[in-house]
Image (tube, rainbow, N blue to C red):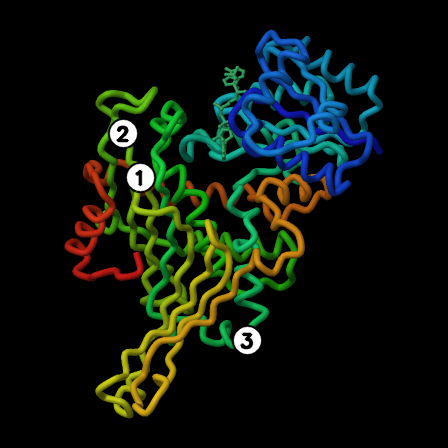
């Protein structure tokens, strides 16, 4: 079969920063067919040479341009013109393509028009197991628009042909969560409200919105981060053991978690960084949040009474994505060492920029005393990789090629996560302006009456 990846939005940031480097690495590892074609689709009236020249300026990773460009074709296409899709299909037919992957790296408002165009042109035909279509996040702007988009998609494609991307799921340590849990009885046996005190899901960024103000101002941190990445991480931490390690069984368990998650509006604090309103394409009076802290509960037997804390934001003190699981104190041990027992058992799954697993436990202080001190087992994931650990998009593109759907989200996951965010809508206070992370942390501590040392 002759493969093709057709990328709409080929002049965008995602194409240049993520997809081209990922395709280059897949070619380097001979994971793409040697004669696979890459159709770069966009609206600009450019020649192939114009496109390549622009791409070379925008791509900031080392890639083999000779190898890449030998496979690439630039296609100018007006997304509202059916004739353009028909011509694209003709080109693909002439090239002998019979395994087509269409990737929509465009804003979600364009999904319906492009879905219709590629369907009517026969580029992706309903029921054709060798044709699939990929949608970037965010899938919709709210529950209503997500449902509308989805209704359209189901008209043109089978669910099995639809791949919805949440690129966090392609990160090595996110894929590792289920292994750390279910392949280690030592953890899984204590993975419940008897032993776990609380869980933190953190995704902090140092950068602001930079050039993406137009997109971000319409979305905000609740929808950009909580609805997708953070809730996806929480579902992997909280889900029950799936019957099998198959995509459908894993998704079935994740959806049950989403249905049990509750966030009360009074347990949410929003922030907006000082200077956000000056960013390009941000409305001068915008109330879009760039920071979210939320306490959630998961209403099932396993997680009764265990708070899940979510924290994400831009312009914070550091770039750090991780999951922290704090275990309960053993009060029995305190009676043995009443003076020095300062218990802390903590498991940290580090996602970015470092990746690995850290476990903190208690040991005797070296020397003559019986003092108890904390110690750490710290595993670095990328240090143990023989080659560079794959970037999320490299893994996701490979899974797309191999029709492995585990790391792509199913419609009911999208629907239930939108519901969680939606029920908060309009019930939240306006964001607090912050000029430092310390300010938001202080606010959280005051509101919740806790220090939150791990944040
Ligand atoms: N960038 C990332 O790292 C990233 C990460 C996760 C998800 N995503 C998602 O991926 C999608 C693309 O993101 P991006 O950062 O690449 O955005 P971007 O830089 O704004 O690029 C958007 C692409 O869509 C095209 N486009 C926009 N409006 C169009 C229209 N009306 N008709 C035809 N083409 C149109 C643009 O063409 P022009 O160049 O001609 O304007 C460009 O090729 C978004 O849904 C985003 O949320 C991006």
- Given residues 238 and 146, the one toward you in this image is 238
Q: Are marks 3 and 1 in contact (CB under 8 Å)?
A: no
Q: Up-down: is 82 above or below 389?
A: above
Which numbered tag is attached to residue 276? Answer: 2
Residue furthest front in the image = 367
Q: Is mark 3 within 8 Å of ligand 1?
A: no
**How far is disc 3 from disc 1 in space, using C-alphas?**
39 Å
Residue occupying the point 68% across, 42% down: 398
Tell which circle, 2 or 3, labels the residue nearer the N-terminal end. Answer: 3
Q: Quadrant of the N terminus?
A: top right
Q: Are marks 2 and 1 in contact (CB under 8 Å)?
A: yes
Q: Is residue 182 left or right of residue 424?
A: right
Q: Quadrant of residue 325?
A: bottom left
Q: Is residue 194 left or right of residue 331?
A: right
- Given residues 323 and 70, the one toward you in this image is 70
Q: Quadrant of residue 74?
A: top right
Task: Kindly identify which residue carries mark 3.
Answer: 185
Residue occupying the point 45% across, 71% down: 191
**How far is disc 2 from disc 3 in space, using C-alphas?**
46 Å
Q: Quadrant of the C terminus?
A: bottom left
Of badges 3 and 1, the one in the foreground is 1
Q: Up-down: is 94 above or below 309?
A: above
Which numbered tag is attached to residue 167? Answer: none
Which numbered tag is attached to residue 315? Answer: 1
């Amino acid at each position: 079969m002759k493969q093709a990846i057709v990328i709409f939005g080929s002049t965008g940031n995602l194409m240049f920063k993520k997809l081209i480097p990922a395709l280059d690495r897949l070619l380097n590892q001979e994971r793409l067919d040697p004669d696979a074609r890459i159709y770069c689709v966009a609206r600009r009236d450019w020649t192939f040479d114009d496109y390549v020249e622009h791409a070379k300026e925008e791509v900031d990773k080392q890639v083999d341009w000779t190898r890449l460009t030998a496979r690439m074709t630039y296609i100018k296409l007006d997304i509202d013109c059916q004739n353009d899709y028909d011509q694209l299909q003709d080109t693909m037919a002439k090239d002998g393509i019979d395994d087509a992957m269409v990737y929509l790296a465009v804003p979600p408002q364009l999904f319906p028009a492009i879905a219709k165009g590629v369907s009517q042109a026969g580029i992706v035909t309903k029921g054709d197991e060798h044709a699939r279509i990929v949608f970037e996040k965010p899938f919709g702007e709210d529950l209503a628009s997500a449902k509308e988009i989805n209704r359209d998609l189901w008209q043109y494609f089978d669910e099995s042909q639809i791949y919805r991307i949440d690129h966090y799921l392609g990160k090595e340590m996110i894929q590792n969560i289920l292994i750390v849990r279910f392949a280690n009885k030592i953890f899984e046996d204590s993975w419940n409200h008897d032993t776990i005190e609380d869980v933190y899901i953190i995704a902090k960024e140092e950068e602001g919105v930079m050039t993406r103000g137009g997109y971000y101002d319409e979305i905000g941190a609740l929808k950009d981060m909580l609805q997708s990445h953070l809730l996806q991480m929480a579902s992997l931490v909280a889900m029950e053991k799936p019957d099998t390690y198959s995509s459908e069984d894993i998704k079935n368990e994740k959806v049950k978690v989403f249905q049990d998650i509750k966030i009360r509006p009074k347990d949410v604090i929003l922030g907006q960084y000082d200077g956000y309103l000056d960013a390009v394409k941000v409305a001068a009076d915008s109330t879009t949040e760039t920071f979210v802290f939320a306490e959630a509960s998961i209403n099932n037997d396993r997680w009764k009474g265990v708070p899940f804390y979510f924290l994400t934001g831009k312009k914070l003190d550091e770039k750090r994505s991780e999951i922290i699981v704090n275990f309960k104190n053993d009060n029995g041990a305190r009676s043995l060492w009443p003076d020095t027992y300062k218990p802390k058992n903590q498991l940290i799954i580090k996602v970015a920029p470092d990746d690995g697993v850290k476990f903190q436990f208690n040991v005797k202080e070296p020397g003559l005393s019986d003092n108890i001190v904390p110690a750490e087992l710290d595993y670095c994931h990328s240090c143990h990789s023989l080659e560079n650990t794959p970037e999320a998009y490299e893994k996701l593109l490979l899974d797309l090629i191999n029709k492995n759907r585990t790391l792509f989200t199913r419609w009911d996951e999208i629907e239930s996560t939108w519901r969680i965010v939606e029920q908060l809508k309009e019930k939240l206070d306006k964001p607090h302006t912050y000029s430092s992370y310390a300010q938001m942390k202080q606010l959280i501590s005051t509101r919740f009456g806790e220090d939150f040392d791990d944040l």
